[in-house]
Image (cartoon, rainbow, N blue to C red):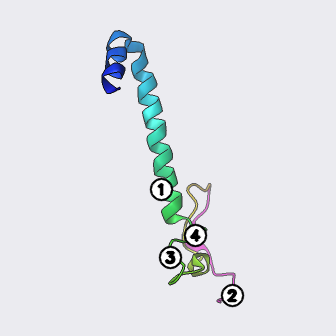
Amino acid sequence: MLSTVLKQVKSHPALIPLFIFIGGGATMSMLYLGRIALKNPDCSWDHKNNPEPWNKLGPNDQYKLFTVNMDYSKLKKDRPDF
């Protein structure tokens, strides 16, 4: 199958950007999925030792991918301890 794709790319060089963008999009989507699975407090992999990981987050922890004009180091604790 790879040889067929290489033949097509050699005979039609206009397909090269298509393969680059599809490969880049697939790579970025897999990286984002991995980030969500490992960094997001809503996803818990260890239910025995840490059943509610969102309770252990401090006010300075950043778990969002992108926030505009937010300095997490200046936030104060505004919730009770459980």
Amino acid type assigned to the residue bearing label 2 in the image: Pro
**Magenta residues, as a range?**
69-82
Q: CA distance from mark 3 to mark 4?
A: 12 Å
Q: At x 48% / y 64%, what residue is drawn? A: 38
Disc 4 on helix, strand or loop?
A: loop
Q: Which residue is mark 2?
A: 80
Q: Which residue is mark 3?
A: 46
Between 7 and 72, which is closer to the camera in this rendering?
Answer: 7
Query: Quarter-wise, where is residue 82 in the image?
Result: bottom right
Q: CA distance from mark 1 to mark 4?
A: 13 Å
Residue 14 image point, x, y percent? 42, 14
Q: Is residue 14 above or below residue 77?
A: above
Q: CA distance from mark 1 to mark 2?
A: 31 Å
Q: CA distance from mark 1 to mark 3?
A: 16 Å
Label located before the other in sequence (1 or 3): 1
Q: Which residue is mark 4?
A: 41
Q: CA distance from mark 2 to mark 4?
A: 18 Å
Task: Say if the magenta span includes residue 55.
Answer: no
- Drawn side of residue 62 relative to residue 16, left or right: right
Label located before the other in sequence (1 or 2): 1
Amino acid type assigned to the residue bearing label 4 in the image: Pro
Q: At x 58% / y 73%, what residue is drawn? A: 74
Disc 1 on helix, strand or loop?
A: helix
